[in-house]
Image: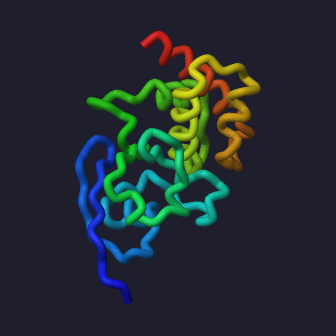
């Protein structure tokens, strides 16, 4: 067994440090070592998008990254979206427009949508559909999600 390595990173604006085996996945490090269970483990192959986080400001699949690869990185998980007890405009839009049902894909969907809206703050419906297509949802048929992302785009522009 390999010697544990120290991983130092910033998660949701908070400096964190932990020791783990070199082969430990980032999603497992977040959930097991840091107690951030909002990042979900789905397919474990980088396909479903449930484990999506923002890695240095860009959407990334944490199930196909090693924790040691995140050493020195800045991460945002779903737990970091809410500020001072107030939902992020994207979370609020998901609530208002019924963009979730079982909630399994929601953390990955929120962070994927946030990354998408950073690169395209005024998307069309077709662009939203394409932008969130990397996250699989088996419940909603995406209708509420698409409406929520569109509403969040407007709210973020006006914020």
The image position of residue 146, as x and y in percent, is 67, 29
Q: Which of the two residues, 100 or 112, is positioned nearer the viewer here? A: 112
Q: Residue shown at 43%/72% (left/top)? A: 24
Q: Is residue 15 above or below residue 133?
A: below
State which quadrant residue 68 falls in. bottom left
Classify the position of the C terminus by image quarter. top left
Residue placed most toward the observer, 24 or 37: 24
Q: Residue at x 60, y 24 (%)?
A: 120
User: Which residue extends farthest top?
Assistant: 158
User: What residue appears at the point 39 percent right and 36 percent down from the top-left corner?
Assistant: 81
**Foreground pick, 51 / 5:** 5
Residue 46 percent location from the top left of the image: 62, 59
Q: Quadrant of the N terminus?
A: bottom left
Of all residues shown, which one is farthest toward the bottom?
A: 1
Q: Is residue 104 above or below residue 86?
A: below
In the image, residue 91 lies at what x, y percent? 48, 31
Q: Is residue 75 left or right of residue 42?
A: left
């Amino acid at each position: 067994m390999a010697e544990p390595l120290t991983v130092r990173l910033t998660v949701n604006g908070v400096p964190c440090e932990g020791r783990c085996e070199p082969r430990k996945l980032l999603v497992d490090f977040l959930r097991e070592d840091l107690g951030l269970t909002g990042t979900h483990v789905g397919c474990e192959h980088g396909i479903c998008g449930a484990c999506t986080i923002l890695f240095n400001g860009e959407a990334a699949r944490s199930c196909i990254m090693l924790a040691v690869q995140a050493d020195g990185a800045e991460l945002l998980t779903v737990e970091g979206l809410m500020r001072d007890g107030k939902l992020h405009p994207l979370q609020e839009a998901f609530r208002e427009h019924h963009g979730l049902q079982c909630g399994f894909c929601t953390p990955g969907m929120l962070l994927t949508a946030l990354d998408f809206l950073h690169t395209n703050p005024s998307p069309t419906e077709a662009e939203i559909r394409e932008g969130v297509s990397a996250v699989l949802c088996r419940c909603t048929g995406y209708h509420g999600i698409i409406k929520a992302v569109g509403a969040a785009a407007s709210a973020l522009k006006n914020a």
